[in-house]
Image (cartoon, helix red, strand yellow):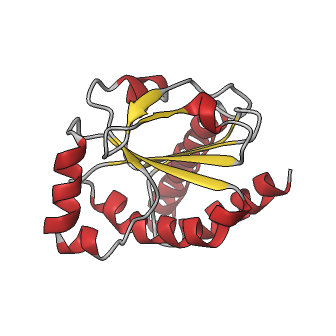
Amino acid sequence: MRFKALGIFVLFVSIFSAGAVMADTAWVGKTAPEFAVPNTDGEIVELKELVGAGVIWLNFWGLRCGPCVRELPALEALYQKYKDDGLVIIGVNVDGVDGNFIKKSFNDRDDLQNAKVTFPLVTDTEFALIDSYELMGAPLNVMIDRAGVVQYHHEGYEAGDEVEYEEIIKKLLAN
């Protein structure tokens, strides 16, 4: 009986994993949807201004999303390591709040203060950016090459994912 239950569990995990991979890879090779959204200081950040300069990494995150907040220090470390090589990380807040609320949250919350995020954070109060990148769950990480083409689209975060992120960054920066 144990082996049968184990077999069913393994089959379920295999099917679920295959579906997750297919959902992620469906984005690879598509032109990244254009956007123009304000950062936390109210300045407009546009994809068309970033394409060609380096690798663009969109990180869709939420203030109430535990994995999102836990992922921020790993993103910051990768940003510091590769920003001079052309890595641009844009943190897209998915809460529908304005820049002042995000700044206040980073000042008031210990978990956010400890993240010490220096990459730009943008707001999407109309949820247009979230919709165009088909966010189903946060965090969502999307990496876009110098030509403006999506090369990576992954939802969720577990400690250690940054190893995979770094491999993709190195590959994209080398092209």
Seen in the picture, residue 89 relative to 114 is either above or below; the reply is: above
Q: Position of residue 140 (x, y in %)?
A: 46, 45
| 150 and 77: which is toward the camera | 77
Residue 38: % across, % down: 36, 35
In the displayed image of the protein, which residue is found farthest to the right? 175
User: What x and y, as percent, mark residue 16?
Assistant: 52, 44
Residue at position x 70%, y 56% from top?
86
Q: Is residue 11 above or below residue 151?
A: below
Which quadrant is home to the N terminus?
bottom left
Tell me the quarter of the picture where residue 18 sits: top right
Residue at x 18%, y 59% (from the top left corner): 105
Q: Is residue 163 left or right of residue 5?
A: right
Q: Residue at x 57, y 32 (%)?
A: 47
Q: Is residue 134 visible?
A: no
Q: Nearer the viewer, residue 135 or 82?
A: 82
Q: Is residue 72 left or right of residue 64?
A: right
Q: Is residue 60 left or right of residue 54?
A: left
Q: Is residue 131 above or below residue 38?
A: above
Q: Is residue 9 visible?
A: yes
Residue 25 position, x and y percent, is 66, 37
Q: How many marks?
A: 0
